[in-house]
Amino acid sequence: MNVFQRLVDHFGSQTKAAERLGVDQSTVSGWVLEKHGMSAVTALRAEAETNELFKAVELCPALHRAAKPAA
């Protein structure tokens, strides 16, 4: 089970997850099916909506890369 399916399970359904995160249900489906990733803004919202149960960097790995200082 990928992190997005776990997120959906947390909210109860794809529709409920979409409503809480301000996206379309089809967007949530795309995450679960690994057709595309989650935006940084939505990942940060998911982190806040789940009281940090799901970390933004886990949902959007680009945030991890952005947090590292350039060498």
Image: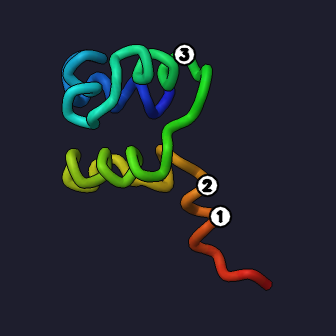
Please say if the residues under marks 2 and 3 sit with CB atoms less than 8 Å apart.
no
Left or right of 65? Residue 32 is: left
Q: Quadrant of the C terminus?
A: bottom right
Counting other residues with Cα less than 10 Å from the Cα at mark 1, is it few (<14), some (14-19), or many (20 or more)?
few
- Could you say where residue 65 lies in the image, as x and y percent from the top left? 65, 64
Residue bearing mark 1: 65
Local SS, label 3: loop
Left or right of 47? Residue 30 is: right
The span from disc 3 to disc 1 (Cα, nearest Å) is 23 Å
Q: Is residue 13 above or below residue 58?
A: above
* Residue at the image point whose x is 31% and y is 24% from the top: 8
Counting other residues with Cα less than 10 Å from the Cα at mark 3, is it few (<14), some (14-19), or many (20 or more)?
few
Local SS, label 2: helix
- Foreground residue, 37 or 52? 37
- Foreground residue, 51 or 22? 22
In primary-sequence order, the first of circles 3 and 1 is 3
**For residue 5, what is the image quadrant?**
top left
Please say if the residues under marks 1 and 2 sit with CB atoms less than 8 Å apart.
yes
Q: Is residue 1 visible?
A: no
Q: Amino acid at mark 3?
A: Leu
* Residue at the image point whose x is 27% and y is 36% from the top: 21
Residue bearing mark 3: 33
- Could you say where residue 34 lies in the image, as x and y percent from the top left? 59, 22
In primary-sequence order, the first of circles 2 and 3 is 3
Q: Amino acid at mark 2?
A: Ala
- Could you say where residue 4 lies in the image, as x and y percent from the top left? 43, 29
- Could you say where residue 47 lies in the image, as x and y percent from the top left? 31, 51
Q: Is residue 7 above or below residue 58?
A: above
Residue bearing mark 2: 62
* Residue at the image point whose x is 34% and y is 47% from the top: 54
Q: Amino acid at mark 1?
A: Arg
Q: Is residue 67 above or below residue 37?
A: below
